[in-house]
Amino acid sequence: MRYSLFYLLLLFLFTSCSKQYSSEKIGWKITLPGRSWKAGSPKPNESSDVKTKQQVEKFLNLKMDGSRVQEILTIRKNDLSSLVSVIETYDLPFDNGYEQLLTEQHRKLKEDFKSKKIPAEYQIGASRIGGVMIDWYNIKTYDEPDKLPRLHTIFSCIRNNYIFSIVISSDNEKDFAVLENVVYSSKFTTKE
């Protein structure tokens, strides 16, 4: 009996230790990964660090000046394994503006890797995550011939008049799987 109570207490401690993050602006809620990952959200008009800002600007083909684009959350284990989420005001006047934006983003990324002579593989699709259809763009880059490929995915959707994007990157499949799990276990409020 004594051991049963001990195990119940341990189970309660482990399940209650998981940290949550939510953004009211887009109705997004996630469970943060374990202790080896650092999570933070910058103050308004401020990026968490220069490296993060440069990575997001490159992958999303936009300028993070704070006026239209805001960083929401960054989760980082090290310089090579991270998740960065941003929102950008969505006010394109035409119906297919979002699709054109994604097409242009994908084209520029391909051109960028090709101009730097970095071999890459691409895959595009969409998944329903937390009840919301989210577009994704997988990129596997081979920066160094003798090393494992770097894995990247850009997730994007429109939420509450914002383009919501998440960029995950890692140099190993284990960390990448952790980040993918964070994204795929996201919850969204029904308000849109």
Image (cartoon, helix red, strand yellow):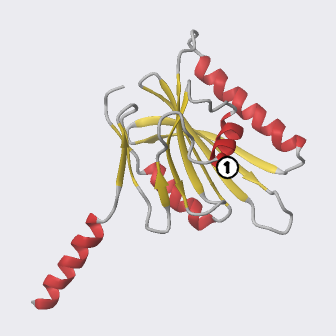
The quadrant of the rendering that contains the N terminus is bottom left
**SS at badge 1:** helix
- The outermost residue toward the left is 1
Where is residue 81 drawn, in percent x and y? 61, 59
- Residue 62 falls in which quadrant of the image? top right
- Residue 104 falls in which quadrant of the image? top right
- The outermost residue toward the top is 93
Is 174 drawn above or below residue 22 in the view shown?
below
Q: Residue at x 60, y 39 (%)?
A: 125
| Amino acid residing under circle 1 | Lys
Where is residue 121 drawn, in percent x and y? 76, 49
Is 92 drawn above or below residue 156 in the view shown?
above
The quadrant of the rendering that contains the C terminus is top left
Is 12 drawn above or below residue 51 in the view shown?
below
- The outermost residue toward the bottom is 2
Q: Residue at x 79, y 38 (%)?
A: 110
In the rendered structure, the answer to whether residue 30 lies left or right of residue 93 reads left
Which residue is disc 1 drawn over?
51
Q: Residue at x 25, y 72 (%)?
A: 13
Q: Nearer the viewer, residue 122 or 67?
A: 67
Q: Give the crowd class for mark 1: few <14, some 14-19, many >=20 residues within 10 Å.
A: few
